Image: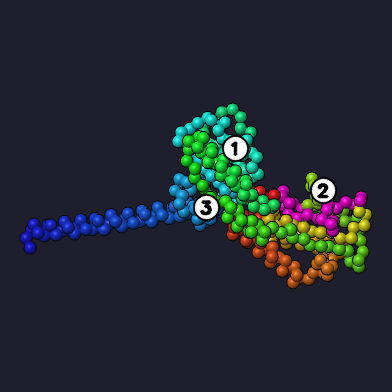
Amino acid sequence: MSDVQFALTILAVVIILIMIIFNWIRLIQYRKQKHAEDSFLYDENGASQREKNSYDKDLSISEKYLLSNLPKDIYRDIDAIALIKLNKATRATSKLNLRDFIELPHAHSFIRKNEDAWQSTEGLSGSASFDHILLAIQLVDRQGPVSQAHIQTFRMLSEKTKNDLDGGLIWLSHSNIEEDAKDLNQFCALVDHMMTLTLIPKNNGIFDNEKLIETLKIDGFKVNKDGYHVFKGRDKHSLFRVTALNHQPLSFNLDPFIQGILFQMDLPLTISCKDSFDTMLESITNFQKELECMLVDSNKKELNINHIERIRYQVEKIENQMVAKNIPPGSSCARRLFS
């Protein structure tokens, strides 16, 4: 082999090595980019999560960024969310169809310009420059899923606003409002429970009202605006309440012979259901000591430890189901959904 041939051979080997290294680098860059796209959205604890809506797979990184920077109290898990991006900024707030949106239940609209903070259109006065519009409607409330008529109106207003202001419309979540509302409503029916435990005096007696009032005070119960005696957690939200046997607030003047009381916990609205349940059991134990009463079921049969453990299991199960759905009990999202 001549020197020229040897040199050409070496050059070819070098070129091949460079191509291999270049392709290897490109492969690493592609994998990093793919990983970034897959883990772009994070839950409240900062952990990456799978997309909840199959439509999200078609969103670009910029659209996912918008989805991860929603206005306060707008939630992709319970709201259908439409984004309108205008071709140019405008001050034409009169074309936002605000009066029609206000008439829709649980509907919200926001505007912003560039990367500014979202501004609610509620009570919007004067002119404001904007090039993004975000529209949202809640899928479900405690009365059931959003009605077909309201869905049609929401879609119509979204399209009208897009056309009136010369923009493009992107569904950031729940583009299939009807089906997604139906699915969420079924989930809500599974977890929407008021857990109730009953205390009655022993030997078919009645409570000593003065002692009952004193026990409520000592145990930290406060009367809320609705007249119920509630026990609040550190965040000042109610964990559970005490009511009369008819589920109404205790009224010592009108009902001098109280034959029983109910401890009630609204599970979807209670932070850390299982821990709150244990706190409620501690309170019940205090009442049993002070008032000589017993914890019974609907047939006035005294509950034993096994019964209580089964109830605790159901409470924990509901809490886990809600956390898995990204709607933790007692969170602002759950409070809006189950209000």
The mark found on residue 227 in the picture is 2
The mark found on residue 42 in the picture is 3
Query: Residue 20 placed where, x, y %?
Result: 26, 58
Disc 2 is placed on an element classified as loop
The mark found on residue 75 in the picture is none
In the rendered structure, the answer to whether residue 87 lies left or right of residue 97 reads left
What is the distance, in whole Å, between disc 3 and disc 2 at their CAs?
40 Å
Q: Which residues are magenta?
A: 231-254
The type of colouring in the image is: rainbow
Foreground: disc 1 or disc 3: 1
Residue at the image position 62 percent from the left and 47 percent from the top: 149
Where, by quadrant of the figure, is residue 278 drawn?
Answer: bottom right
Answer whether labels 3 and 2 touch (C-beta < 8 Å): no
Foreground: disc 1 or disc 2: 1
Task: Count neighbours of disc 2 (C-alpha within 10 A) and say few if under 14, some if 14 to 19, many if 20 or more.
Answer: few
Question: Residue 238 lies in magenta, yes or no?
Answer: yes
Q: Amino acid at mark 2?
A: Gly
**Between 76 and 136, the one nearer to me in the picture:** 136
Q: Is 98 rendered above or below residue 285? A: above
Task: Note whether residue 218 is visible.
Answer: no
- Residue that badge 1 annotates: 120
